[in-house]
Image (tube, rainbow, N blue to C red):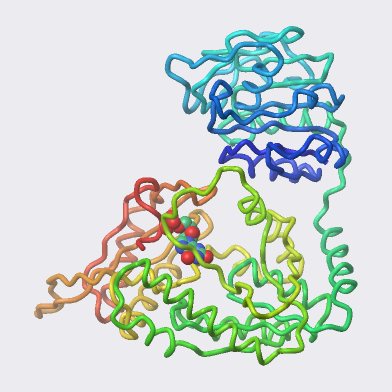
């Protein structure tokens, strides 16, 4: 396959996905992975990714120069190109203004990487430093405002200042295909059907006759993991589903229908709504609410799992981006929100982990889910945070507010589906503010809560923009919420992007 050395660019996972879409296995490893370890993977090619640092910085992220002499084709992207220039004797300088966004690429001298690419095309740039002088043996193959591509064809080293993995680069896929298929001649060995078969066999082998428990949330990852494991070992698997009372409308019933009845899985449903609500009483600070919910979740799950003392395995829906994130070299970024995920390992239980989706990107998990017969709308659900509606009801949470929010949220989501908008946005939901305002209904004065409709579009949830939903649609949603949900008399639309706002309100 292709090994991608991770220098911290937010586009890295996209490179990995693009390559897998070509049915070639790709793996993302930290840039400082020892050279022997990289070579032991016998990669058909190596990609040096983009990244936020500067090669001229004292603490620059570097690699062993010998990487370039290993006889393996190399593609350097953005920082990867600057790094190549820097290590092989070229010169990288701080540009005058940098380039962010679309640029025009002009090919000066084609090469195997740029075969079939138009002489002029649009590419996506995001850099401040630039290559001023190319190293010996290299030729400039394209320019934009700066040197946009350089290559040493003899040594099979190709580099680009722009990002071919981003859709804004018109012929980016063609370029990546040239690298993977023509230059690396990588074997097409990555097919999801094969993955499912192989994983089922591995699960059987690993688990034997032992029992497995899994924390099912109703979300995409834990559901696909559950169905896959169930397919492998049937009733040796029990799913624990904790109803925190902070879930979407009818979520508990739907999970039992979709996975219990339809797939015949054993699901142990715990109704813990009272417990969660009582822990949240009197708390209005967002971080305190998150902690209270997270701790209670662990407590409930822990107690529940004691019913299954005999179980040797704890299954989780960990996916490849979680793995990359945990091995990432970006360093601990400041805690903005304390995240918690469903199904954390109860510490005193000595269980082995079973994580059958560890190698898959989200879109691959979805394809596996569909292949296993999970309905399309379930595998294409938006993400839902662990603390649930607890962080979408601003201020103190109580049962009445939960009910109000569930109804409003349900209307918004239903309308998104009806209008074919659900899959055009990345995440959508309603937030309930503890703010009351005056309205008029019929001839009567009302004094009720404000709901905020939120919808975001994003690739990686690290940055996001608000969805530009049609006015008529928003008008319809607003009127339905105000007319149908007792307790809300005003609806606002959130037009903030992330940063500086975040997607959730707490
Ligand atoms: P923010 O609000 O930080 O959210 O822009 C980014 C993404 O993370 C989700 N999120 C969570 N997911 N547990 C989760 O599993 C959490 O505690 C949590 N907090 C936020 C959020 O829904 C969005 O998709």
Say above or below: 274 vs 336: below
Picture coordinates of residue 56 (x, y %)? 56, 20
Q: Quadrant of residue 484?
A: bottom left
Position of 166 with respect to 157 (left or right) is left
Residue 113 drawn at (x, y percent): 75, 22
Q: From the viewer's perspective, is 37 left or right of 290?
A: right
Provide residue 184's location: percent of width, then percent of height: 84, 30
Q: From what the image shows, is residue 88 above or below residue 305?
A: above
Does 63 sit above or below residue 415?
A: above
Residue at 27% across / 76% down in the picture? 483
At a point 79% along the width and 84% down the height, the residue shown is: 211
Query: Which image quarter is the C terminus in?
Result: bottom left
Say which residue appears at 55% left-offset and 45% top-offset.
331
What residue is shown at x 35% (from left), y 76% (from top)?
A: 405
Image label count: 0
Left or right of 221, for residue 242: left
Residue 341 sits above or below residue 17 on the image: below
Q: Quadrant of the N terminus?
A: top right
Residue 421 in view: no
Q: Splitting the image into 4 quarters, where does residue 153 fall?
A: top right
- Residue 486 seen anywhere in this rendered image of the structure: yes
Instruction: In this rendered view, identify the residue nearer to me: 472 or 403.
Output: 403
Residue 43, position as x, y percentages in the image: 84, 37
User: Which quarter of the picture shows residue 316?
Assistant: bottom right
Question: Which residue is more in the foreground, 204 or 257?
Answer: 204
Q: Residue furthest bottom?
A: 307
């Amino acid at each position: 396959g292709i090994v991608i050395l991770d220098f911290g660019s937010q586009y890295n996972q996209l490179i990995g996905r693009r390559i897998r879409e070509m049915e070639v296995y790709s793996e993302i490893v930290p840039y400082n992975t020892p050279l022997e370890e990289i070579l032991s993977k016998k990669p058909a090619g190596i990609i040096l990714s983009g990244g936020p640092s500067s090669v001229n910085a004292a603490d620059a992220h570097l690699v062993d120069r010998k990487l370039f002499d290993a006889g393996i084709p190399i593609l350097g992207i953005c920082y990867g190109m600057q790094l190549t220039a820097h290590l092989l004797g070229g010169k990288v300088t701080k540009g005058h203004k940098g380039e962010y966004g679309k640029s025009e690429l002009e090919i000066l001298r084609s090469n195997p990487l740029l075969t079939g690419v138009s002489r002029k095309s649009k590419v996506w740039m995001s850099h401040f430093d630039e290559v001023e002088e190319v190293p010996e043996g290299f030729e400039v193959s394209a320019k934009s405002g700066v040197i946009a591509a350089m290559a040493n064809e003899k040594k099979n080293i190709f580099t680009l200042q722009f990002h071919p993995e981003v859709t804004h680069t018109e012929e980016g896929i063609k370029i990546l295909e040239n690298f993977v298929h023509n230059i690396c001649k990588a074997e097409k060995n990555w097919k999801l059907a094969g993955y499912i078969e192989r994983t089922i066999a591995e699960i059987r082998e690993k688990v034997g006759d032992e029992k497995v428990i899994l924390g099912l949330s109703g979300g995409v990852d834990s559901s696909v993991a559950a169905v896959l494991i169930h397919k492998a070992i049937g009733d040796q698997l029990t799913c624990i589903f904790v109803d925190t009372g902070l879930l979407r409308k009818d979520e508990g019933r739907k999970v039992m229908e979709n996975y219990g009845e339809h797939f015949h899985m054993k699901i142990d449903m715990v109704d813990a709504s009272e417990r969660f609500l009582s822990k949240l009483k009197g708390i209005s600070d967002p971080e305190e609410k998150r902690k209270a919910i997270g701790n209670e979740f662990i407590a409930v799950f822990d107690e529940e799992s004691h019913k299954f003392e005999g179980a040797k395995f704890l299954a989780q829906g960990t996916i490849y981006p979680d793995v990359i994130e945990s091995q990432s070299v970006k360093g601990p970024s400041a805690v903005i929100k304390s995240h918690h995920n469903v199904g954390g390992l109860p510490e005193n239980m000595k269980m082995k982990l079973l994580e059958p989706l560890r190698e898959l990107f989200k879109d691959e998990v979805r394809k596996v889910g569909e292949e296993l017969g999970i309905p399309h709308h379930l595998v294409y659900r938006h993400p839902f945070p662990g603390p649930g509606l607890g962080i979408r009801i601003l201020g103190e949470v109580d049962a009445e507010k939960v009910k109000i929010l569930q109804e409003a949220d349900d209307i918004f989501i239903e309308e998104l589906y009806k209008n074919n908008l659900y899959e055009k946005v990345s995440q959508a939901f309603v937030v309930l503010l503890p703010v009351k305002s005056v309205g008029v209904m019929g001839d009567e004065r009302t004094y009720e809560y404000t709901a905020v409709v939120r919808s975001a579009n994003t690739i990686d949830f690290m940055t996001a923009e608000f969805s530009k939903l049609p006015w008529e649609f928003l008008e319809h949603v607003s009127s339905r919420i105000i007319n149908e949900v007792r307790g809300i008399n005003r609806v606002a639309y959130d037009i903030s992007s992330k940063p500086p706002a975040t997607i959730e309100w707490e």
